[in-house]
Amino acid sequence: MFKKIIALCLSALLLCSISTTAFGTDTPISTAPTFEEAIPKEVQERMAAQTPALEAYFELMEFFEKDEFGVPIYPDHYAGEYIDENNKLVVQFTEKFSNKKVLSYIASSPLIQTKQVEYSYNELVAQKKVADKLISSGTRVVSHGVDIVNNKYEIELLKDDLSKVSTTYAKNSLVSFKEGEPSQALAQLKGGDKIYNDDHGGFMSIGICGTYNGRKAILTCGHGNIRPSNYPSPSPYPYVNDSSNAYLIGHIVYAQANTDPQNTGITRLGDFAIVEITSTDTTTNLVNIGGPITGTY
């Protein structure tokens, strides 16, 4: 739902270099770069420029109910939001949207622009049934999800299936089709796997696998925090290891964490870490207790 906004910040973080560690050994590494050193200046400037719009987004979400995981539930006739090239938060809704509190807040914020569209977010989400039907029929769906900017439910297909399916669903104006390339599974590391920081034995889970500066990497689901500055190590970043096999998977090349549980706005994002893989483990697009993911992140 709000991944298009968060992705604008997260996408800027996957960029850095690292020395290698031999499988099963703990060789010294060079001091990890700071955020300012690792992230190009123009990216830092773009992130800073987007911060006010992100703050406005989080304030807006306070008007909405939340599900059991704390994720905002969009009301009827609301159609999502995104940050445009002018660093404004663009909020979309259909002509039937009538939540007075939300409309009042939007009208009061100079950081928000509104856009009337044809379909609500909930209407678009319901089109997941089209993708599910295609998958069950053997059609090779690469990815699918709500395209908030274009107010469509977008489905990516392999080239051979695209023309046939586009014709079949030509009358469904809520869905758009495009050609996509399949993501490729490689090997062992999976989303949801449990891994350990070797600084204090605390564990975290793998969120997704991918690449970082062209090398294998994972994005964790929290608790990949930076070591204290007085920790006896050549680097402030902890190695990450597999506790059961006691070998090193890799080490953290970037970490972000809240410093105060009372923080609001964008600091609510919690903590996460990028771990570059330096062992012989390989990344995969699988989920630990599920099946293969055929889409992209």
Image (cartoon, rainbow, N blue to C red):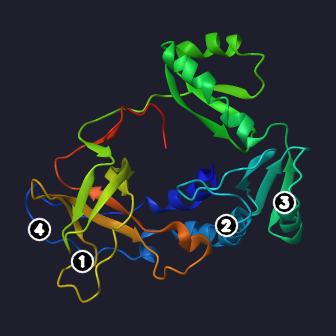
Q: Is residue 247 left or right of residue 149?
A: left
Q: Earlier in the sequence, mark 2 or mark 4?
A: 4
Q: Residues within 10 Å of mark 2 (few under 14, many from 20)?
A: some
**Which residue is labeled 3 in the image?**
113
**Which residue is labeled 4 in the image?**
27
Real-space Cα separation, disc 4 to disc 3, in angstroms? 52 Å
Residue that protrudes farthest toward the bottom in the picture:
230
Query: Which element carries disc 4, helix, strand or loop?
Result: loop
| Amino acid on which disc 1 is placed | Ser
- Whole-percent x, y for residue 25 in the image: 8, 62
| Amino acid on which disc 4 is placed | Thr
**Which residue is labeled 2 in the image?**
58
- Whole-percent x, y for residue 221 in the image: 39, 58
Circle nearer the viewer, 2 or 4: 2
- Whole-percent x, y for residue 177 in the image: 65, 25
Circle nearer the viewer, 1 or 2: 2
